[in-house]
Image: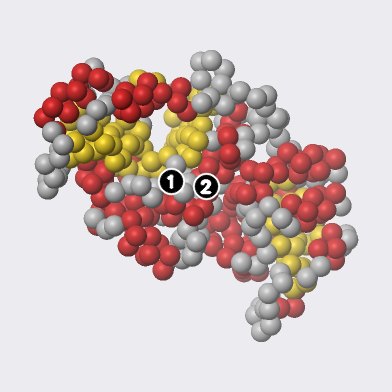
Amino acid sequence: MKIAVLGCGTVGSGVVDILDKKPCLMEKSAGEEIGVKYILDIRDFSGSPYASRIVNDIDIIAEDPEIGVVVETMGGVEPAFTFCKKCLEKGKSVVSSNKALVAAKAQELFAAAKESNASFMFEASVCGGIPVIRTMFSSLSANKILSFHGILNGTTNFILTKMIDEKMSFDTALKIAQEKGYAEKDPTADVDGIDAARKTAILSSIAYGHHFFEDEIHTEGIRGVTLEDAAYADSYNCRIKLLGKADSRNNGKIGAIVCPFFVGNDSMISGVNGVYNAISITGDSIGDVLLYGQGAGKEATASAVVGDVMECVRLKKNEKHYFWENHEDGIVEDYLEYETALYVRGYAKNPGDSLINIREAFGGVKVLERKGAPGNEIAFITPVMKEKELREILSDLKDFASASVIRVL
Ligand code: HSE
């Protein structure tokens, strides 16, 4: 079968390289040879091994009956959506690594795939090489997914690891992440949690069968996390991790949030460092499952894309249909209704008096200490309560200005 690759950037070129170099993959695709016939890209590739296959017109791909699977690694919603839809309507299966596209447009692409008996697959859109989509959708399908939480963004995990282990400032760690090519020049999508929110939206859609949009998920990034917070986390036997988290709640609603958490060192997730990702899924039959691996990078992500391509080739006559439905308004729980404990760091003119007030207001807190803290700094862990109540108590505290608030997992 011949395939086409839309977008020859890091992941797209990784896909072409794997398919060019590994003819042994034929055995895994039911003996059928998979070759890249076209690469759609507007950049100049003259002199590269891709040059003879570069095209600029999507119609060349959509109209070629030899093309069975189209790989979309362009990123962004448009023109990726228009191109993918066109190819699906022509009966070609589409494999995408593009989380922005899946988080915004999956349902329309599922419908187009179903209409023409093709498949739309997107394993690489969440956590690069880690096989979480198929695991959640197929392997765990006997389970009600009670909850999942995970480190879904490698760049922020790299930055937090540098801050915690090497006492590096956020700005220095970000600079290194950019030098190493993990973070973009404009790091907003990673550091502000947007990338993790898209991945949380996709995983929530699979877990709970309704389309969750990224803007329905309360999202906080890591720009506000400081070395002081990391030191207090350490004193409480925790590490700070940016997590995407969702759960099915007793009232029938779904809670979903992306934010930094204090994660206890007894949790396997707290030991996942650098650019690595991990997802812990809890099902009602299986209990806990932990998936760990490289959530980004050329080869890891291309590995997931090529896995989907081969699945499409194997399934040629028996197309695979992922799906989820719309949900009614109000299914997503307001994050202020969750019960949680909060870590709070702040400053008071009279710390002794303020601590008495704080203890009384919360009905007891765990006071934290760190070496070198200024005399007017107070840090503590609240009891577990609805976040709304905790925030109200916090804002009513007199003579105490909070500088940092982080949820405790
Ligand atoms: N920028 C993402 C990360 C990789 O750092 O995890 C692509 O999703």
Which amino acid, by three-letter code, is at mark 2?
Ile
Which part of the image, by quadrant, shows the N terminus?
bottom right
Question: Which residue occupies 78% across, 56% down?
Answer: 83
* 3D distance between C-alphas at marks 2 and 1: 8 Å
Element marked by disc 2: helix
Q: Earlier in the sequence, mark 2 or mark 1?
A: 2
Residue 194 badge: 2
Residue 95 badge: none
Label 1 CA crowd tier, 10 Å (few <14, some 14–19, many 20+): many
Element marked by disc 1: loop
- Residue 303 percent coordinates (x, y): 57, 56
- Residue 172 percent coordinates (x, y): 32, 62
Residue holding disc 1: 221
Label 2 CA crowd tier, 10 Å (few <14, some 14–19, many 20+): many
Look at the numbered discs 2 and 1 and tell me whether their residues touch, using CB distance below 8 Å: yes
Query: For residue 102, what is the image quadrant?
Result: top right
Residue 129 appears in the picture as rendered:
no
- Dot 1 beta carbon under 8 Å from ligand 1: no
In the image, is 215 to the left or to the right of 392?
right
- Residue 87 percent coordinates (x, y): 81, 54
Query: For residue 263, what is the image quadrant?
Result: top left
Q: Nearer the viewer, residue 316 or 143?
A: 143
